[in-house]
Image: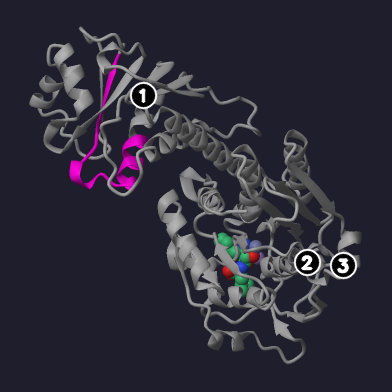
Amino acid sequence: MRYSIRTGSPEKINADCIVVAIWNKGALSDEAKLLDTATQKVITKIIQSGDFTGKLGETQVIHNINGAVGKRILLVGSGDKKKLSGSSVAKLINSALKAVLKLKASSLHFALHSLNVIDRDSNWLAARLAQEAEVLNYQYDTTKSKKAKAFTTKSITVSALPGSGRKSTETALKRGQAIGKAVNRARELGNLPGNICTPTYLAQQATIIADRNRSVTTQILSEKQMAKLGMGSLLSVSAGSAEEAKLIVIRYKGAKADSKPYAIVGKGITFDTGGISLKAGGGMDEMKFDMCGAASVIATMACVADLKLPINVVGIVAAAENMPGSRATKPGDIVTSMSGQTIEVLNTDAEGRLVLCDALTYVEKFKPRSVIDIATLTGAAVATFGSLANALLSNNDKLAETLIDCGQDALDRAWQLPLWDEYQGLLNSNFADIANIGGPRAGTITAACFLSRFTEKQKWAHLDIAGSAWHSGAQKGATGRPVPLLVEYLSRQKA
Ligand code: BES
Ligand code: MN
Ligand code: ZN
């Protein structure tokens, strides 16, 4: 998709569809008024007919217009003018795009520059439009014999006032597009099946990104190299699988070499059978999504390079397949992590924390300014938050606060759960330093408590994305979250 800016009155814009906003009770936006006057009140007539009220998200296509250069008009309901928030704009844009992408319209013009978003700056709308258009343009067809039919739309323009601000609107469009593409990259990796998207495949994808960007380098650690580093916990997860585990290290350099990096660490279980603590059969296919944390790390690294952020970032992916093979780890087995702490594996289905703990110890060597891990870690996070929030736990309240704010801004929200010391006792083991499960209660918290034992020296936050990373049911598929949140966080940082 191509994005650009066009100045000029909406009735004079040559496009296959001109999108204008209508407020509650049919009140015309400034751009709608101009179009209406030029077209013998075609908009007013529709509103008078009662067919269109301006309710947020409502859409109506108008054909055969006279007096305007464009071929069609799309009215989009924009709700209460005084309550136009970021989330309502997102809804408005989403509905408008869904309606126009169905049409045989190759060029779209969004005449929305008079819209005043109460809680966002003026270019947020342009960025959101490009992001949303990219995301809606993605259709999974990689493993279908018939390829999806591409949408007709090839170019999207947005209106802008002439002169000042043009440049920043252009930047916003580029930024939104880059985020949308990164979201789709994460979705694609998530959607690919476990027999294609293996730890080796994830490593290859990271390498391809490095090959295409001068500022990105990768290093792939083999099982042998991990064994040398003492990553007994991570390797206990891949032990039952024929697929070799990989520790994928992706480095982006956007600042001086000695500038300490920000770190993101992703859980990359390319399929989670549960291991010897085997999962039930129903819905187990969805455990191909157990690498969505890894996908978000890989996609965010690509996006950060795209955006040329002026910081250094290191992305680590702990990739393994959790299978019940003859060499698989058994309940009660005790393994030694890279940190030296011994772990009693009481449940082999709590494998995410076992791969992450060694990756979190490994990341210390980069002396990161902050560490955020991203993981589809617990079913309890789904029970707690459904699909709306990324569960957030942190040993640093300031970092947690920043992430919550970034999530609001990017409409990829996170909500914090407590990481109180009193929960730590649930991980006591009679036979090792720590057990890998904390019992049936407070599952998201005890999982984070486990990780906190390996991040004591770090400014660290954990995002449990088990609920937010994919949809089940008819719309089954990866969402690409929390790429928008991570990109927002990294965009706010300084070298
Ligand atoms: N990948 C799962 C978490 C999960 C489950 C995500 C369902 C989304 C939907 C994770 O590896 C797991 O199996 N967690 C267990 C932990 C338990 C054994 C302590 C869980 O949540 O049941
Ligand atoms: Mn599991
Ligand atoms: Zn898992």
* Disc 3/disc 2 C-alpha distance (Å): 11 Å
Q: Nearer the viewer, mark 3 or mark 2?
A: 3
Region rendered in magenta = 72-94
Which amino acid type is shown beneath numbered disc 3? Leu
> In the picture, residue 446 is in which quadrant?
bottom right
Q: Sequence-wise, which precedes: disc 3 or disc 2? A: 3
**In the image, residue 159 above or below residue 308:** above
Q: Nearer the viewer, mark 1 or mark 2?
A: 1
In the picture of the structure, the residue carrying the numbered disc 1 is: 163
Q: Is residue 280 visible?
A: no
SS class of the residue under badge 3?
Answer: helix
| Most foreground residue, 315 or 139 | 315
Tell me if the residue at label 3 has its CB under 8 Å from ligand 3. Answer: no
- Image x and y of residue 80, in percent: 18, 43
Vertical arrangement, residue 468 with respect to residue 426, above or below: above
Question: Mark number for residue 234?
Answer: 2
User: x and y percent of residue 420 in the render?
Assistant: 52, 83
Indicate yes or no whether the magenta region holds residue 73. yes
- Distance between the Cα atoms at labels 1 and 2? 56 Å
